[in-house]
Image (spheres, rainbow, N blue to C red):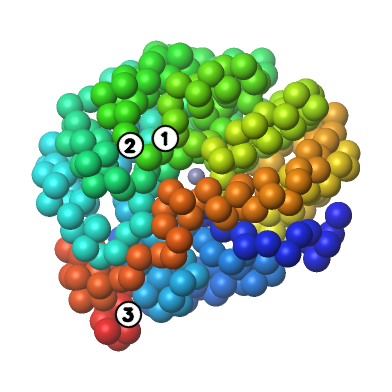
Amino acid sequence: MEMKEFADLPLIDGHVHLDAPAGATKQAVDKLESFALEIIDRGRLSQMYLSSNYLGTYLKAKHAGRFYDGGEVPWSSTEVPWSSIGADVPDWREYLDGLMACGIDGIGEMGSKPALKEKFRPLSDDFYKDFWRYCESHQVPVLCHVADPEEFWDEASAPQWAKDRGWVYYGGEFPKKEELYSDLESILCHYPDISMVLAHFYFLSADLERSADFLDKHPKVSFDLTPGIELLYNISRKRDQWREFFIAYQDRILFGTDICDWQKSKAALDRIWVLRNFLESDEEFFTPRTADHLMTRYTEPFIGLALPGEVLKKIYAGNFQRIFGKQPRPVDTLCAADSCDKHGQEPLAALIRELA
Ligand SMILES: [Zn+2]
């Protein structure tokens, strides 16, 4: 199908990264802003949820209703002390109260990717204890990445692009995929009322039964469809069973692309196209030539699920809105500008003040 043939439905991309490094200049911010607006427009998105270190706060204040903002929290492999918080164990209440006052809609993407054992801190570490407690008691949803595709632990099957990025875990002492899963399980047992979206289908797309058991066991947890394009490939190999799964768990699956600002806009749009074609058509198709290099080229095709409109509606927007809010929360511009100043984002602070 072509982009213009896809269903005319609200579509929220729940997983986008725009990197606004500390001290990002106005010129850099303008560039990221026009990239985001172009993708929303040409990708037929109604809204985007951004992980972007306060850039999302600015964009959401400037373009009311178009952006959701994910507050930044360190990934488990980040060195302590985490510079933005500046303490070995942060005062989570103060930090998260500050983010909430700025108007964030959720936390993350954050999570745990494998790191060498001496650098690795589990999500169940004391460091995060008050973070999880806060998210549960204040009902702040968390977009969380746990583990990676299983082939990254295996030298023979890891794709070259993962090797090039150092996302491989076979040389040296890395936590195993199952250790990362038990780490998360212990959090979900301690804080069962946390609203969590696990990115990349929780890397469980090779195991339909386990995915179903996991979602049954944790009713407040959902999966997003962000590639990890291996998930489309795995699902295509058992397409009919997975189609039933998508219908049965239609309330627990969210649309997301992992669009990043280093991608060309065509490549970013390809991510939207691949996912929509997979969900809406029954076509056999391959990764487009123009897609970015993280979108592995397989020799067997993806096979579309041709899901009913009612299911698409939930995956595209309804589930996201239930978890993160029907509309983005309003930004308190003065409070947001002060927070930007505190966290090394002075140029962004000045831009936000202009909107006040
Ligand atoms: Zn991501």
Q: Quadrant of the N terminus?
A: bottom right
Residue placed under numbered mark 1 in the picture: 220
Q: Is residue 51 above or below residue 354?
A: above
The mark that comes first in sequence, 2 or 3, is: 2
Instruction: Tell me the element at label 3.
Output: helix
- CA distance for labels 1 and 2: 7 Å
Residue 194 tag number? 2
CB atoms at circles 1 and 2 under 8 Å apart?
Answer: yes
Q: Residues within 10 Å of mark 3 (few under 14, many from 20)?
A: some
- Compared across the picture, whether 153 is left or right of 292 comes to left
The mark that comes first in sequence, 1 or 3, is: 1
Q: Nearer the viewer, mark 1 or mark 3?
A: 1
From the top left corner, tell me how far across and down residue 178 is, in percent: 45, 14
Instruction: Tell me the element at label 1.
Output: loop
- CA distance for labels 1 and 3: 37 Å
- CA distance for labels 2 and 3: 34 Å
Instruction: Tell me the element at label 2.
Output: loop
Residue 351 tag number? 3
